[in-house]
Amino acid sequence: MAKTDAVKKTTEELYAFDNNKRLSYPVVCGVDEAGRGPLAGDVYAAAVILDPSDPIDGINDSKKLSEKKRELLFEEICQKAKAYCIATATVAEIENVNILNAAMLAMTRAVEGLSEIPDYVLVDGNRLPKLSVSAEAVIKGDANSASIAAASILAKVARDRELRKLDKMYPEYGFSKHKGYGTKAHYAAILEYGPSPVHRMSFLKKLYKNEQSK
């Protein structure tokens, strides 16, 4: 299979990265998070143990996939993975311990929630959450490891689904369109209607500071 561009790797290349780790650690788990940047909603994380004997074609960094493709892969990953877990840290926890620590907490919960204990955990990024098993931080892991890419898809799709639910509860903010990110329309809605119970108030300090200085 040829590369579609200079950056995006093939499914085979992503699985090869994990298979290399399996030479030393038979049960490899990938972990990623979604939702550190948005102004509202919980932060999500997923942990996935893929079955190397049953590869899932098309797995890649969730950011490089269409929403439709992510949804399809979400279902296939859930069906074919040897184990998976999706976990969150709440808005209250984000406000209490900050977004970075909340994301780490969600990732810890995802790994701890697996039905199978991994021998080795591959975590997207340059930091590791608190884990009871051996782990490695992989920069741009979702673009290099099949397991991390699978986790990125589960976390992203799960969070997007939750934001669509929040959109029905708080339709004035347009959550289904921007998924909680700081778009111009989202900021305008916050200024018009005030923050909702699912907004991260610590993320809105700059917005209100700018308004007060006008």
Image (cartoon, grey):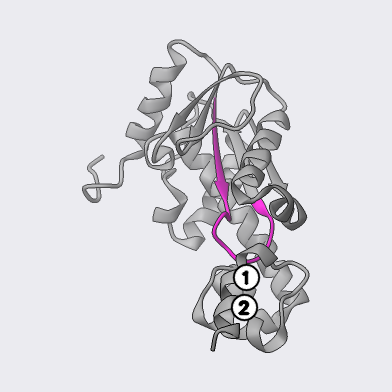
Residues marked 1 and 2 touching at CB (< 8 Å): yes
- Residue 86 sits above or below residue 41 on the image: above
How far across and down, in percent of the image, does residue 100 sit?
Answer: 59, 46
- Residue at x 62%, y 51% (from the top left corner): 99
Side (left or right) of 23 relative to 164:
left
- Identified by mark 1, the residue type is Leu
Side (left or right) of 182 relative to 204:
left
Q: Nearer the viewer, residue 70 or 76?
A: 70
Q: Nearer the viewer, residue 113 or 127?
A: 127
- Residue 172 sits above or below residue 166 on the image: below
User: Crowdedness of circle 1 by 10 Å Cα count: few (<14), some, many (20+)?
Assistant: some
Element under disc 2: helix
- Residue at x 64%, y 49% (from the top left corner): 44
Residues rendered magenta in the picture: 29-43
Query: Label for residue 55?
Result: none
Q: How many marks?
A: 2
Location of mark 1 (residue): 204
How many angstroms separate mark 1 from mark 2 (CA)? 6 Å
- Residue at x 56%, y 71% (from the top left corner): 206
Query: Any magenta on residue 33?
Result: yes
Query: Label for residue 208?
Result: 2
